Image (tube, rainbow, N blue to C red):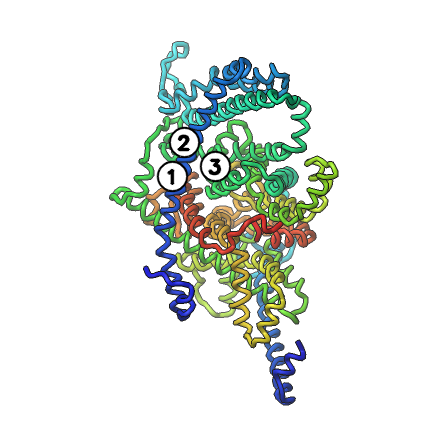
Amino acid sequence: MADLKKLSEKTPENELKKHIGLKASRTIGNTLIYILLIIMTVIWLTPFVCIVLQSFRCESTYIVGYVIPQQWGLDNYKALFQTDFPIWYRNTLITALCVSVLQTVIVLCMSYTLSRFRFKLRKPLMKFMLVLGLFPGMLTMIILYRVLKDLGLTQANAVPGLILVYIASSGMGYYISKGFFDTLPKSLDEAARIDGATRAQVLTKIILPLAKPIVIYTILTAFMGPFGDFVFARYISMNTSKGMNVAVGLWSWLTPDQVQYKYTMFCAGGVLVAIPVTILFLCLQKYYVEGVTGGAVKG
Amino acid sequence: MKLYSDLEYLKLSKGQKFLYNLRCFFAAIPRWFAKIGIAIGRFFKNLFLGIGRELKDIAMTFVHGDWKTKISYVVMGFGNIARGQILRGLLFLAFEAVFIFYMVTTGVNWLSKLPTLGTVGPHEEYDEILDAYTKVYGDDSFKILLYGVLTIFFIIAFIYTWRMNIKQNQTAEKILATGKPLKSGKDDLRSLVDDSFHKTLLALPLTGILIFTVMPIVFMILVAFTNYDGAHNGFSNNLFTWVGLENFKQLLSFSDGNKVYTAAFGEILTWTLIWAFFATFTNYFLGMFVAMMINKKGIKIKKFWRTVLVLTIAIPQFISLLYVSKMFAQNGIVNGFLKDLGWIKDPLPFWTDPTWARFTVIIVNIWIGIPYLMLIATGILMNIPADLYESAKIDGASGFQQYAHITLPYMLFVTGPYLLTSFTGNMNNFNVIYLLTGGGPDKAWASAAGGSPGQTDLLITWLFKVTTGAESKYYQASVIGIMVFVVMALITVVVYGLLPSNKNEEDFQ
């Protein structure tokens, strides 16, 4: 490589000029990139800094045009505990824990099977689910709401109903982990099968230990799903405060007639919700990145 | 259209090549439709041929089978039990018993009411004890439709099981004729964790999908052909009933009465497509750009930059979206900040002016979407062989040329399927639109179209609005949902045909 370069640049002066030019342009380029990255960092962090600062504002509760509170205090956080916020938090946490366990089991069953087994209905099944996925999921909400209502799993009892809805269709989201299983060499299975292991043993003893990254990825995304879901949770809780999750509850504080009194409390609630989820996410970030970059593309 | 040979094509200039490819693309469109038509035709042909074959096979098995097989045509599982496969036989028999019991007690009732969706609505009846007229509830159209659909599913399942039962008799006879023993119940159970392990694994997920996705979708498609809405809720006020294609006619006719509906649908569909296009491609290219910046040689603390961006993925979306929506409010932080700087006197109409609102939504979506794309792009960029760049450098390629001829084609090739799913995902991106603008600002002229759609409403948020409120036009929501499906299916089929990376999945192994 170095020899090639020398051949193309014959005179020493020329070489020196080019060298300086290259170096200068690289420094300028990198400085530009640093400036851009710093601007981006500011833009990306501003909302989060603002929400934290505003959650400590005590002098007023409505939307204002400045960021730094004139009067600091924990009033908003204290006020949260006089509302239904703890109930919403508990609802969300229960839902998220149940969903993360059950959904992971279902998704892994589905993706492992579709990746490893070759049976007659495999291709048609995958095509069928692709077509099903093109229907807006929200459409099914109308009937599911009526059915769950007949079963008594809506409004104040929304949590079990919500868990049921989340996990029941989770088999459709098998793409990413199937992409992962596709990358594990098949010769592993075959070697174990020749040694006399059953299919179930292959899964539990050989594949699962290797699949740790994707298992953690699935658990993480399944856990975060209920924290972000808005529309299903709103539909099923149907204006009953006791059955809401944090998303629906905090949203209801920003409706035009509430926002005057609850805006800073929304900020405080948002901070309390975001902290544990963010910490969890950043701890497991490695697995998330692996899942996204590996599975999302192969799909 | 004139087709060039490979040699002629290579002689063309760049512009000509582009025009030629473009013409090829549009010339191919009729062929796609023809292909789809042929595929549908072939599907039905195979279906009928398949049914014919099955019927013939059933008849032949009956003629050639022994008495055990013949009895199995009426009493399912009899052949299995008589040949010693007790477990299978009992399962068949139990299924038949449950089916007959269900059909006799309730199934026939639901099926018979399905064509009318109920005849007796809620009405007043004279009560002798109270000596007054009291309200009496009759049929429940919703339940009739729901259980009608369930019963039909059940019947299909029964026919399938019955056919399986006959096939098993046939194979059992064949096996016994060769003198080998049949599989015992123990063998069957063992195969559930071994050879048929996939059946065990798929049983739970598929049941869930069947009950909570397939059935509701079938039900909602049927609702599009009824007049189910808030005023005809099927039980407590009025029954609803079949109206045929009336709802689709309303959507697609340009008669005076429905002009608003049709026009609103057209506008919302257009905006949905524009939104999906910009949301997908701005994120895609900017995300790639950011990834390349961070990955560039000589840039330090790469991990820090990534973590900052990843924060938007980590923090639950509803918090960041709702908060950002209030930041851009008339009296929010952004306007306050700009005023303090003295750049503006009146607050900027971020959410109140239609054009501003549409721009702001796309900009905020970039803020949300870049980190995700950055992660994906980072993974792919690292996989590009470094020697490609080295040889390009030796040949004197500039940074931009390297990007245009190596990075971009490689990215597009690998992420083709992802782009497609991301486009359809954005078409249905409920959260971003609903939490940021709630669909607003108002679109006053369209309020007659139902659900009072706003300027930034997507089809999916409109669908949601239609189903809430007093009117609750469920049939309209269903029609919109079906239209969303049609649009998405068309896009998927067309784009999938174009993708270069339409590759064999076995290649990865």
- Residue depicted at 35% across the width and 21% down the height: B119
Question: Relative to B425, is B17 on the left or the right?
Answer: left
Residue B223 higher or lower than B133, as above or below:
below
Q: Position of residue B250 (x, y in %)?
A: 30, 40
The number of numbered badges drawn on the structure is 3
Determine which residue is flagged by label 3: A140
Mark closer to the observer (2, 3): 2
Q: At label 2, which amino acid type do we have?
A: Phe
Q: Do the residues at pointers 2 and 3 share their chain?
A: no
Question: Relative to B241, is B375 on the left or the right?
Answer: right
Which structural element holds mark 1?
helix
Whole-number angstrom distance, CA of label 2 to CA of label 1: 11 Å
The local crowd at label 2, few if under 14, some if 14 to 19, many if 20 or more residues have their Cα within 10 Å, is few
Q: Which mark is residue B41?
A: 1
Q: Chain of mark 2?
A: B
Q: Nearer the viewer, residue B82 or B391?
A: B82
- Residue depicted at 38% across the width and 32% down the height: B228
Q: At label 3, which amino acid type do we have?
A: Thr
Q: Nearer the viewer, residue B174 or B212?
A: B174
